[in-house]
Image (tube, rainbow, N blue to C red):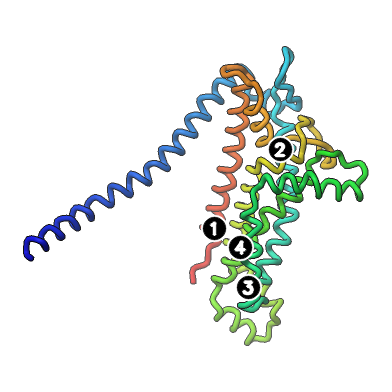
Amino acid sequence: MIEKNKNSFSIATITEKTIPYFLLGIATISILTTIGIVFTLLSETISFFQAVPFWDFYTGTTLKPLGDDAQFGILPLLTGTILSTLIAIAVAIPIGLMTAVFLSEYASDHIRKVLKPILEILAGIPTIVYGFFAFTFVTPLLRSFIPALDPTNILSPGIVMGIMIIPMVASLSEDAMSSVPNSMREGALALGATKLEVTWKVIVPAAISGIIASFVLAISRAIGETMIVTIASGSTKAFTFDITQSMQTMTAYIVEVTGGEAAAGTTLYYSLYAVAMTLFVFTLVMNLIAQYISRKFREEY
């Protein structure tokens, strides 16, 4: 019996000493993966800028990647990406925030338990389904109101992207508002404030760090969206601010190049990495902003 207890104790001791190293190895994998991604993007992007001047790439308004007179200006892609993102957040932020306010402050427990899972179903729908929805339903519907709307345009996918990220805004904002202590609600109500005043003058300001973080993360998600814009926005590389026209985003361009015949070592091939690096910096900056806002305005209860 004593020998058996010693063996058990020895195994437990070895396990306890081994687990930290195992967990460290798992954590290191994610770090090494990130380093590998950044190294790959940087090395290939540097090769691109050896052929195309940095200034011409980021200020050029013409993107013509094929032919002897090829030109690589990213502004058409930046314009498409920014416009689609602005349309998406114009849809997602008001609807998502109002939904979060209702779920947190007005809905009963029964209604909340029913509505929140239904809302989060939107987050589980594949983005390619959203893309076909934008192309086959939303665009024809919009064309009945806007006859000048092109069959592929940036307005339709922007709206559908907004619908897609509503659950992110609503869920994270609702969690932030629900974390505000009830004592703050009860104190404001005891002072004579109405339910609406409590919501907008007490609860929302108290949860502002989580709410703004949800906005920034949703924007980051919209910037990186691929399939919706690939299907519904078209592939016209035009530098325009007309949202009724066909445009292309950075992610859609990456899909086009990887799905085409870009031979390794060509300028077209390297342009893929330059655009991807730009997209990476965009999303990295958005995530850093979200972290900064969360730390700066976080309330401890």
- Mark 2 secondary-structure assignment: helix
Q: Which residue is mark 3?
A: 112
- Circle 1 Cα neighbour tier, 10 Å, few/some/many (<14 / 14–19 / ≥20): some
Q: Nearer the viewer, residue 189 or 135?
A: 135
| Residue type, numbered disc 1 | Ser
Residue drawn at 74 percent across, 50 percent down = 160
Label 3, label 2: how many angstroms apart (C-alpha)?
35 Å
- Mark 4 secondary-structure assignment: helix
| Residue type, numbered disc 3 | Arg
| Tag of residue 294 | 1
Left or right, 202 with respect to 183, comes to right
Q: Which residue is mark 4?
A: 171
Residue drawn at 89 percent across, 46 percent down = 143
- Circle 2 Cα neighbour tier, 10 Å, few/some/many (<14 / 14–19 / ≥20): many
Which mark's residue is nearer the viewer, 1 or 3? 3
- Circle 3 Cα neighbour tier, 10 Å, few/some/many (<14 / 14–19 / ≥20): some
Q: Quadrant for residue 7, please give it.
A: bottom left
